[in-house]
């Protein structure tokens, strides 16, 4: 990670020597987020606890491979070099959520009270990540009549402040079961990212895709044999300040 940051810094410094024009943009976007990998699933179940049980209710596997909808706000600064070459840095706060469907509830109770109850259910669980994301990138600008098209490639370095599970499912017995607990296992998420920005005057439309390398299950005991990686699609609007 340190070698990557050093390399990006050196590239930025070199291109700065040949830069013609700085640009600063602020914006907001919607983010579609999900997990991939052998440990991600589309369906799971809730292990439901009674109110007096020390163990909280939880989703058996919260790492859903269905897209959840999140958001982000941030800004970026870039340098436009000779020939249309770009180098820049974006910083944003984002809240990204994955989704997994719930089709069953297993109600665990103390052993002395008898066996657990299992029944069908209908609901979903979201795994919400609060992230400060840094995106260093390089790119190339293509002028198309009145529109400028930027093609960008870089990395996401996400600093995760929290990962939180929140789920709800209605059982076939008529009761509703919920989960609400911290699921933070890793504090950094590294992704490879590609993006496109179309600009007209001071307004821009942007889209990007990022594929994660970090294993969100790496923080679990025995998590080395399991993996869940992030995938993010972002679509947003920007306004160039100068």
Image (cartoon, rainbow, N blue to C red):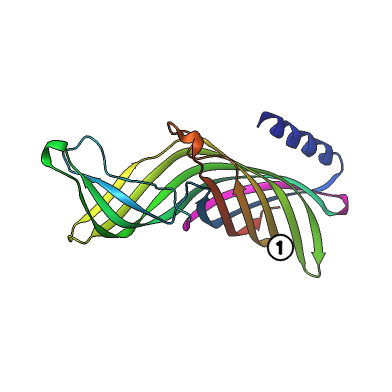
210 in magenta: no
**For residue 179, side relative to residue 26 (left or right):** left
Whether residue 186 is visible here, answered yes or no, is: no
Q: Residue at x 30, y 50 (%)?
A: 46
Q: Residue furthest left?
A: 113
Q: Position of residue 237 (x, y in %)?
A: 60, 60
Q: Residue furthest top?
A: 2
Q: Nearer the viewer, residue 79 or 36?
A: 36
Q: Is residue 48 above or below residue 184?
A: below
Q: Is residue 239 above or below residue 91?
A: below
**For residue 105, side relative to residue 127 (left or right):** left
Q: Residue furthest front?
A: 115
Q: Which residue is mark 1?
A: 199
Q: Residue at x 80, y 54 (%)?
A: 140
Q: Position of residue 34 (x, y in %)?
A: 50, 53
73 in magenta: yes
- Local packing at callout 1 (Cα closer than 10 Å; few below 14, some 14-19, many 20+) is many
Which quadrant, please, contains the N terminus? top right
Q: Position of residue 115 (x, y in %)?
A: 17, 44
Q: Residue at x 75, y 34 (%)?
A: 7
Q: Nearer the viewer, residue 22 or 236?
A: 236
**Magenta region, residue range:** 66-83
Total number of numbered discs in the rendering: 1
Q: Position of residue 78 (x, y in %)?
A: 73, 47
SS for tag 1?
Answer: strand
């Amino acid at each position: 990670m340190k070698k990557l940051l050093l390399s990006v810094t050196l590239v930025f410094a070199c291109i700065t020597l040949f830069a013609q024009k700085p640009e600063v943009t602020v914006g907001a976007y919607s983010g579609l987020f999900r997990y991939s990998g052998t440990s991600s699933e589309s369906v799971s179940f809730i292990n439901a606890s009674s109110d007096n049980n020390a163990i909280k209710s939880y989703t058996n596997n919260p790492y859903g491979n269905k897209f959840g909808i999140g958001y982000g706000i941030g800004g970026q600064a870039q340098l436009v070099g000779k020939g249309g070459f770009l180098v820049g840095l974006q910083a944003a706060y984002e809240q990204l959520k994955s989704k997994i469907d719930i089709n069953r509830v297993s109600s665990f109770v103390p052993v002395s009270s008898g066996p657990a109850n299992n029944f069908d259910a209908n609901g979903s669980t979201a795994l919400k990540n609060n992230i400060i994301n840094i995106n260093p990138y390089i790119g190339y600008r293509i002028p198309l009549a009145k529109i400028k098209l930027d093609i960008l490639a870089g990395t996401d370095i996400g600093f995760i402040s929290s990962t939180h599970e929140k789920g709800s499912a209605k059982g076939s017995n008529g009761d509703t079961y919920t989960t609400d607990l911290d699921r933070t296992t890793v504090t950094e998420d590294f992704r490879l990212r590609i993006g496109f920005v179309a600009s007209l005057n001071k307004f821009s439309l942007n889209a990007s895709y990022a594929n994660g390398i970090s294993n969100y299950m790496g923080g679990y005991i025995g998590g080395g044999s399991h993996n869940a990686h992030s995938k993010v699609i972002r679509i947003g609007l920007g306004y160039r300040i100068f």
